[in-house]
Every structure is written in structure tokens, then in C-alpha cells.
Image (spheres, rainbow, N blue to C red):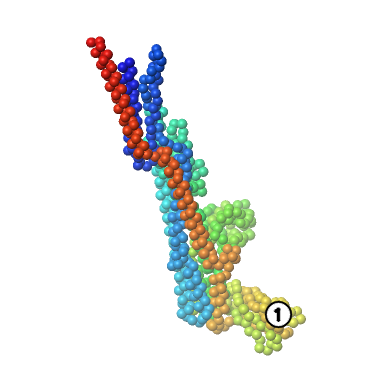
Amino acid sequence: MAGSLLLTGLSGLSAFRNALDTTGHNISNATTEGYSRQSVELDARPPQFSGFGYVGVGVETTAVTRAYDEFLATQFRSSSSATAELDSYFDLASQIDNVLTNENIGLSNGLQDFFNAVQAVSDDPTSIPARQALLTEGKAIEGSFATLDQLFADLTSQVNGRLNDTVSDINNLASSIASLNEKIILATGAGGGKIPNDLLDQRDHLVDQLSEKVNVSTNVQSNGAMNIFIGSGQALVFDQQSNSLAIQQTGFDVSAIDVVLQQKSGNIVVTQFMTGGEMGGSLRFRDEVLDPAINTLGQVAVSLSYTMNAQHNNGLDLNGAQGLDFFTDPIITPIKLAGTGALAVSVANTTGLTTSDYTLTATGGNYTITRLSDNSVAAGPTAFATPATVDGLTFDTTGLVNGDSYRIRPTRDAAGDLKLFINDPREIAAAAPVISTVTPLNSGTGDISNVAVSGLLTNQLANATVDSNPITLTFDSANNEYDFSYGPGPTTGSVAYNPSTDNGVSRSITVGGFGTVSFTLTGNPTNADTLVLSDNTGGVGDNRNANLLADLQKALTLTGGTASFQDAYGGIVSDVGRKVQAAEANGLAQRGLLNQTIASKDSISGVNLDEEAANLIRFQQAYQAASQVILTSRAIFDTLLGAFR
């Protein structure tokens, strides 16, 4: 009887000692990050049978468990991953937004100042100071594009650096999780299947940290090891082994990088599958904000350079020479990925130009052009000998051979490549190369005005037909038309004009070896009245071409003829601004959800010091009571011994 009572008391001492130890462990780790509250599970020991029934023989410790909810843990990781992604996205996008909206750095004021200077030359085309001011503003606009291009280059480097650091963190966490898997398997085996709670907490904490880097999913094997998957199911940790991520350069761009999963058979590109966490935020920023902004800025640079050059080439400078390029020509260099052939790409028109990149592949004597913004086939399959015009670009495909593959990035580098070409104020071509005159002996009121030239062939002005052989238009009243002739031969043609219906109509004549001359016909000419288009010799005070240059500011030369230079740049600013605002709002909402999840998780797994203090007193009293049982057992035993002495 006394022996049973002694054993019962000893079982209580042992059980409540375990409870006290566990309570002390909880209190000690109340502020340990990732720690889950533990508790001792007690159960009555199997009773002993006596003649009058079963008598209890004490208590035993069956397990030490941790307060852990798998659903809340998964929800926490998902919310944590989403919050980290939005924070990273917002941080990077805000940097672009702050610069684009800065009046001293952004392009809006620079474009306005540049075209104000063009208008000043138009107002006084002979003024050397006005011309010099235009060159100064041209240099300033070059600097604005270069500054923004450098900003985007710096942000690209920053994104690449973040991705590299994140990959390093992910690899370290994966290695540590695999190491803990091994410890957990060994500890579980050594403990006869009992779970090492503290090791599980350490592993879960590492998985929580990993979820801040990239979105993860998990499953636990029967041996206690946890498998970690990222992306679309790529195994990062499997049992006691971990795989590694790495960064590698994208083949067509030294500044572009991909995330790869390293395997013995070769690296697997997983960039497109990396979502959530800091990595997902960095990649989303690069794909949704940075790359489109770079390409759109390049689109504006190409359009400004191309349209300014085309119009400037149509004018005369103060030296009487044809206008040179105002800016450097936009040059598009296809990036050869494979093959031995040749491909040339040039700008056909800026109206159709997009911000997309393209790929061209050649096989079976045909080529196919793919627009990468929507992965659609833009042209082909088409025979090599047939060039294509796609989205304002001309593809000279006559040099292709089977097996060729190219990446075409028409606007990617344009902002950094834009340079002012002319440096002499006298070289600004403000005048038009052709003037019109009405023959004084005409008896009618026929007139010609608004004479302009387009497509003036470079370096052809000195030998132009209009220069040496003026165009004479003679009215034919019987057929209601102006007959014209020019050049040796001569070359002849006619322009319809009915005074009653065509008054104020715009007409044009394409002159071989020169370009296209457009003009407006008005009045009521009589038969044989003549109008003459001739070279604008000595027209230093002419501002017609300067007016056309100034008109380019509001010309809809971008995005399918729907946007001007400033509209397109404003589109970058507003698009980035919207995305920053959305990221900020979504981030606040996601942060609130994360805080709720943390509160729910802590209510289950967190250590409540008040509760633990109460448990400490309760278990201490139970321990003391168990010790009294032992003392009582001893007293009974001593009484029995005394009775037999």
C-alpha cells in the first residue's frame, strides 16, 4: 500500500516537474521569434486491480506538444509573401515616379523649352542668337534623355543586385532547412517517434523567412522532413537535400538576367515562375514598369529624332545648303542569336512604332517575325527575298539564311543614343527650298500658296530639278487642270483644278530626283495663266520650314497617330504613377491582412506570460502536493516498521 502510494507520488513529481520545465521553457522563449508555445500532455497510468476494484497508481507524461495551426501558418506565409512583393515593387516604382515627376529632371519641361526655341527661330529666322539658343536647347534635350536613360540603367543594376542578393538568401535558407530536416529525422528516430518541437519551430521560422523572398508551398513527409517548392512546383528542398538558384545573363542583353534552377543536366530558366516575395516584386517591377518605361522613352527619342531629321532635311540653312540631320539618326542593330546571315532594320514611320521587342526566325527559306509584347505573329512565314514592314519598321530580309535567329529591340537604347548632330547655328534649316511666283502677265486671279517640300532626298538639293529647271504650271480651262513641265525632255503632267469646286484644295507633285512639292491652289485663273515653282535662292528670311518644325510639337506622330511627344512621355508618367498608387493601396490592404493573420497565429502559438505565470503557480502547488504524497507514504512505511519492531 505504502509502496503504491510512493510510486504514485513519484509519478506526480516527475509529471509536474516536466510541466514546470515546459512552463519555464515557454517563459524563457516568450520573445524568441518563431517560437510556439509548448504544453505537457498528462494521462493517468493504468490502475491496479484489488479485491474491491481498480486503484489508481498516478500519472505519466505522454507528450510535449506545441501550439501550432497548419492553416494559419500557410495563410501567414502567403500573406507575408504578398506583402513583401508589394513592398519591393512599391519601393522600386516610387524611385521612377519621383524622378519622372521632377520638373528639373523629367522630359516635359525640356520638350517645351526645345520647341519654344524652335518657335523663336521661326519668329526671327535670321537671328543667330535665336539659332544658338535652339542648339543649346537641343543639347539640353539630349542631356534629359541621357539622364533618364542613366536612371533606368541604374535601376536595372539595382534590380539585378536585389535579385542576386535574394537568390543568395534563398539558397542559404534552403540549405539550412535541409540541414534541419536531417536533424529532425534523427531526433524523431532517437526519441522513438516523439517530435522535437524546438527544431520544428526553427524550421518553420526559416520557411517563414523564405516566404518573404519568394512564394513557397510545402508538404511534410512521413519521416518528418519538409519539402519546399517554389515557382510552378520546382523543388527547392527535398528531404535532406537542397537545390540552388542562380543568376545568369540573358543571352541577348548584357544588362538583363534570368533566375535559373541549377541541375546536373543544366540550368533551367525559372524567371517566369518566380512570384511573390522580394523576388516576385523585383521581377514584376522590371517587367511591368521599368522595361516598358525604357522602351517608351526610347520610342519618344526615335520619333523626335526621326521626325525632326526628316523635316530638317526638307529645308535650307543660312548657307543655302540643304538641312542636315538635326539629331543623330536612330540606328537599330538586330541582335543575332543564331545563324550566319544578315538582317537590317530601319524606321519606316514613327506613327506605327510600338514599344515592343521582336524576334525573327528563318527556316525553310521563310522568315517569321513575332511581336513579343503579345507573342503574336506580326509577319510571315514569308520568303527571304520579300522584305516586310511591321509596326513602322522595315525589315530587309534579303540577306537571311536558314537557321538565322534575331532579337530586335527598336527603342531600347534610343534614349541614350540620341545626340545633337549639328553644332553651327547657321546650319539650322529654317527656310523652305522652293518658292512660288505668279506670272505678272496672268489675266486671271489664280494663285498658289502654302508651298512645302517633303521627302527631299539627302545631298540632292544642289542638283535638284527644281533648282535648275523650275516647274511651270499652265492652266487649261477646257480640261480644268494645270499642266506642268520641268526638266530636260521635258517631263510633263497635270494637276486637276476646277475653280468652282477646288478653290483652296491642296495638291502635290512628286519630282524625280528631288522629292514631293505640295501647295494650295486658289482663285479663278484664265486659260494659259502660269504659276512657277522655283529654287528659293537667297531665302535667308524664310521661316516656312521652321514653322513646320515647330508644328511637330503637337503633331500626332506616335502610337498609331494618337499621341504627340509630350503625350507619349506623359503616358509614361501617368502609367508609373497609377501603378505606384495601386501598389501603395494594395500594400496597405495586404499589410492589414498580414497583421490580422499574425494576431490569429499569436493567439494560438504565442506565449502569454500571465497565463504561464498562473501555470507556474499551479504546477508548483501540484508538485508540492505530490511531494506530500511521498512524505505521507514514508510516514505510513515508518509506522508499519515500528509496529513490527
Q: Which residue is mark 1?
A: 482
Q: Quadrant of the C terminus?
A: top left
Residue that extends furthest to the bottom in the rendered view of this protein: 441
Which one is in front, 552 or 217? 217
Residue 511 to residue 61: above or below? below
> Above or below — where is 69 with respect to 333?
above
Residue 394 seen in this snapshot: no
The outermost residue toward the top is 644
User: Please, is residue 161 above or below residue 438 in the view?
Assistant: above
Q: Residue at x 52, y 72 (%)?
A: 325
Left or right: residue 555 versus residue 600 is: right
Q: Residue at x 38, y 34 (%)?
A: 38
Residue 191 placement (x, y as % from top left): 38, 28
Q: Position of residue 337 (x, y in %)?
A: 52, 53
Along the viewing direction, whichever of 307 and 595 lies nearer the viewer: 595
Q: Residues within 10 Å of mark 1 (few under 14, many from 20)?
A: many
Q: Which quadrant holds the N terminus? A: top left
User: Which residue of the protein is positioned furthest toward the right in this rendering?
Assistant: 478
Front residue (pair 370, 21)? 21
Q: Position of residue 354 (x, y in %)?
A: 56, 61
Quadrant of the rendered image containing residue 622: top left
Work out whether 626 lies above or below 164.
Answer: above
Q: What residue is rendered at 63% in x and 80% in y?
A: 449
- Secondary element under disc 1, as helix, strand or loop, is strand
